[in-house]
Image: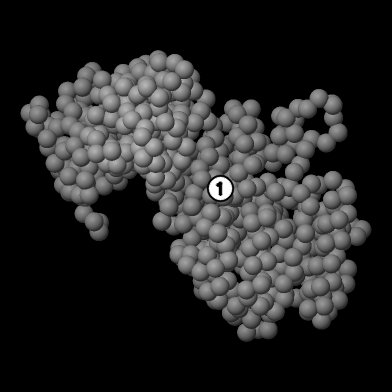
Amino acid sequence: MANRGLARAREIMGARQERVDALQKEGKKIIGYMALHVPLEIIDAVGMVPYRLLGDIREPVTEADRGLPAAFCPYMRSMLDLTLKGKLDFLDGLALAHYCDAQEKTVRIMTSMVDFPFSHFIDVPTTVHDYSLDFFTTQVEDFKKTLEQYAGTTVSDDRLRQAIDVRNEQRALVRELYDRKKSTPPALSGRETLEVILSIQSLPAEEGNALLREVLDEVEDRDQQGAEGKVRVLVWGSIIDDPAYLEVIESSGADVVIDDLDGGTRPYTTDVETTGDLVRQLSKKYLVGTSTPRTVVDAGEGPPKKDNIRDLAARFKHVKRFIDDWNVDGVLLQSVRYCDPHGYELVDVMDYMRHLEVPAIYVEHNYSEGAFAPLRTRVEAFIETLE
Amino acid sequence: MYFVGLDIGSTMTKAVMVDDTREIVSTVVQQTGPEHRRLANKVIEQLLAEVSVPIEEVTFLVATGYGRINVPFADTQTTELTCHAKGVMYFFPSVGTAIDVGGQDAKGLRIRDGRLENFVMNDKCAAGTGRFLEVLADALAVRLDDLGPLSLKAKDPVTVASICTIFAQQEIVSHLSAGAPIEDVIAGVHDAVAGRCVRMTRALGIVPDVVLTGGVAKNIGFVRAVEERLGEPVRVPEDSLITGALGAALDARDRYHRATAKGEVKRKERKLTEAKFYE
């Protein structure tokens, strides 16, 4: 581990498997998860390591047709492809929560075709009302019991609170990292940010926090004197799990200063409260406190007349805050093909951007390294309209 | 002082030279072909030779189009979206919406207050591009140039419902088998292509004046089909192929003068060389 900070993050992204192998040799169990609603603290608390499952835009999909149609979320096709090629065989288990129907179906197919030592699927409601939270809490309790059984241990409140404290610290560190991107030019690029976040999602929580502290120290000393800022862009949308995407955007003449992505700010905007029933507090964070297109938030009680902008303002208040506080010039809305949650949400985000009079474009892409050229042309043209 | 725009499209390569008063002084249009990396310099040589201007007098050169990165002697690259907007505004300052239909892609541009404001692009699917018309001409054994005039004779245009070029081709064949006159089939295909381009552009909100450009805008049948779909007249530049290259030349002039105002002008020692594959 000679490298530190950003170089270490890049090293981990280049060989995520290596650190996992070493952890398994130390006797740690690795639990694969997908964003965004699996309470990681429970995995931490039983002494296992949550490991975010990423697809691979560089690996041609050759096996997935055995289980999935061609016109289907290409990220999920990649996940099934990697599973069938044995690339997830190292996992000690899967912990998944309903993100979208494509993911739910894919997970069922994955677990029916490959025998994982442990797998658990958490049902997630699509609204954030109190009765949804009541239901989701029963799901999280169930997950805790099942995992405790698999681990042969019982998690005390103290142990769970410790795990929450460490993850709360991680979320605070990530927010601090994003705060450093408010400057012109930002203290670290979008590509670097994504590398750091995908790295900490591949590491035990404490190790991730140490990496975050190293990165924060490193960018503190960055000499930005005389450097000119570029067009400041917010990237919104579906899965981006390869830093090369942000490289395409940034090499087209933009600084990705903030995002609304699963591999970006989404898991880190809110904390878990540590008073009262901890499982309910966890459930609250992972359902109500996690903004994502798959969960509907409306403006709640109000005038009886339907006011769409009022709903949108409630739903996208975080995006508005990002645009204001990070001084955003334009918003790049992106999605992989066939992504239902983002496809439906797109119309609303676009409406709200128009209402805010913030320039925005939508780019759909193929989740493939080979499909970058059309993405680049659209991004470059968008930046030209902002200059 | 001359400014050059070079637009390497999927099917045609276009070059335009303007002087400092924005007057067009020279134009070249050629097939792109598979060897476009080697031909970019030849096109420029021809552009210069036609008006006997030595390369040293080219002050700034902008490359655009999907082959824009393969022009080693360009000062910079600008996307075809920005360039088309500039080229269209040159001919029609009152433009609100432009639709460019090229050999293998189609673009919709929304232009407001002399600037490109928003755009949509289809470069994934042959339906709604010139490629569809090439396939049609092939299937009917008709020259591409004859499609437009023939379609104007249609009495009862057929409906082509398939949104995929390959399936549409099957549909065309079955219309012919059913005895539909060739003119009606061609008019039906024009309407299908126009429908796709108009639907795509509607996402931006279509605001007049509407301008059609690209190779397909040379087809009068297609232009009429778009007008019918929109319910209003559209305008087509005299040479609908060159708007991208012209826009690039105008962009070259703009960039040069902006840089001069900032005192940042660096004259590039320009040699018309081929792009190397492994540079």
Please give left or right for residue B275 compared with residue B122 in the image: left
Q: Where is A332 relative to A309, above or below? A: below
x, y percentage for residue B224? 37, 21
x, y percentage for residue A358? 58, 31
Please give left or right for residue A224 compared with residue A38 in the image: left
x, y percentage for residue A226? 44, 42
Q: Amino acid at mark 1?
A: Ser
Q: Which residue is mark 1?
A: A335
Is residue A50 among what the camera can see?
Answer: no
Q: Secondary structure at mark 1?
A: strand
**Which residue is at 78% across, 78% downward?**
A150
Please tell me which residue lies in front, B177 or B5.
B177
Displayed quadrant of residue B180? top left
Q: Where is B174 relative to B49, above or below? A: below
**Quarter containing the C terminus of chain B:** bottom left
Question: Looking at this rendering, what residue extends furthest in the right direction?
Answer: A276
**Quarter containing the N terminus of chain B:** top left
Displayed quadrant of residue B61? top left
**Which residue is at 63% across, 63% downward?**
A106
**Which residue is at 17% across, 23% downward?**
B25
Please give left or right for residue B220 compared with residue A115 in the image: left
Please tell me which residue lies in front, B142 or B34.
B142
Please give left or right for residue A355 compared with residue B9 in the image: right
Displayed quadrant of residue B237? top left
**Which residue is at 42% across, 31% downward?**
B158
x, y percentage for residue B248? 29, 31
Q: Where is A92 relative to B67, above or below? A: below
Is residue B215 among what the camera can see?
Answer: yes
Q: Where is B206 relative to A325, above or below? A: above
Chain bearing mark 1: A
Question: What coloring was used for the rendering?
Answer: one colour
